[in-house]
Amino acid sequence: MIDFTLTDENRLVQQSARSFAEAEILPNIRDWDARGEVHREVFAKMGELGFLGAPIPERYGGAGMDYISFAILCEELERADTAFRVVQSVHVGLNSLALLQWGTEDQRQRYLVPQASGERLATFGLTEPGVGTDAGALSTTARRRGDRYILNGQKIWISLADVADHFLVFATMDRSKGHRAISAFLVEREFPGVSTGTLHGKLGIRAGNTGFINLDDCEVPVANRIGDEGEGFLVAMSAIDQGRFTVAAGAVGLAQACLDASVAYARQRQTFGEEIGRHQLVKQMIANMARGTEAGRLLVWRAGWLKNHGRRNTRETSLAKWHATEHAVQAALDAIQVHGANGYSDEFPVERYLRNAKAAVIYEGTSQLHTLIQADYALGYREDRPLRCEPWPAQGFERVPA
């Protein structure tokens, strides 16, 4: 039986994350966003609070949170600003959880432990200038030479590209074999042949770093390959399932922020001698925000419940991500409408919410991709094999995510 009653730990995480956001992010975010500033010291404080190892078992230096707590953490961070939820997505969801599932014990000790404590920051490198949704068509290459692989190529639209210490990078051993030839590698910034840069002129998430990674004859030890040769696509897809969960949870937080701002403004602003919240069409927009936000939260928590019980959740996580991110965009549009001309100004946060919301209907699978995924499940064209893993908190995995 699914029970969504929050535990004392869930509520403690919610209180801790909200207090952190109100003290460390909200007083500064307007200026950081306007100037495009990234403040790594805030990430360090997130590490001190255990946020950067939230669902990682305590034996690897993590906080050992269940997935409902992890969702709540992502929701509260994005309620303040998307840039800080993105850190949870790429550092924890896409990188650290992939290491937990696919890494050797040596790799977990060398990389996962310092990542879980926040001592080192990590990210995920799959997207390329010519490759997005079609992840099996990578042009970045890897060839083995003795006890090393030589990597060549470029990754783009990489969160924390100019900030992270470690990159989980994907490359093909033979392009003619498609996704079956892709392998995964843990690349350190200090490896010769690695260079990074920052992308400027983004619509949103301006307080977060986004850039590119260049690999020029980069030598990576065989000991840094994650999984076996040819398993990289499976590593990537299982990691993206985790990343989508964090994106969905964060989108709920952004929609909640839109609702909170709209309610406050509608109770304060008056036209025709009464609060605008008394006007029917304003009520309609606020009601739709509330409805979509609650539905998104329940979809996220259902996926989290499945994760806690060691059950496959690709379909449920996809649905949560699709709904929550689409709703966040609409909630931001309606929030601006509720604010009228003021919503078009950065004096109020809702214009930032809209700029930030738009990215999430693109990354971690576009809305169009999730539409096809859900249709294929409904039509019976797609079905999942069971994911054999221990339920939380053991979090021991067998590598069968296909």
Image: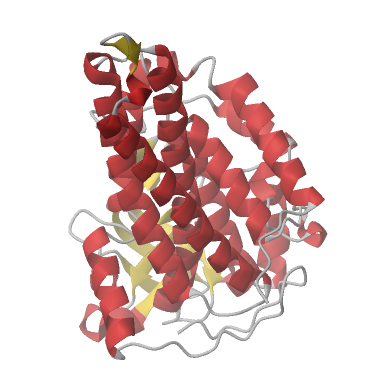
Instruction: Decide if residue 198 is in sight here.
Output: no
Name the quadrant of the C terminus. bottom left
**Residue 262: horizontal and vertical position, in percent?**
39, 27
Reply above or below: 44 against 135.
above
Q: Residue at x 63, y 52 (%)?
A: 70
Reply above or below: 398 against 66.
below
Q: Residue at x 78, y 53 (%)?
A: 61
Reply above or below: 128 against 373.
above
Identify which residue, 213 or 13, lies in the foreground. Answer: 13
- Judged left or right of residue 352, residue 40 is right
**Residue 13: horizontal and vertical position, in percent?**
72, 43
Quarter of the image for residue 108 reads bottom right
Identify which residue, 298 or 149, lies in the foreground. Answer: 298
Q: Residue at x 43, y 26 (%)?
A: 263
Reply above or below: 112 against 22.
below
Identify which residue, 388 or 332, lies in the foreground. Answer: 332
Q: Which color mode does the image show?
A: secondary structure
**Residue 318: horizontal and vertical position, in percent?**
40, 67
Identify which residue, 326 or 134, lies in the foreground. Answer: 326
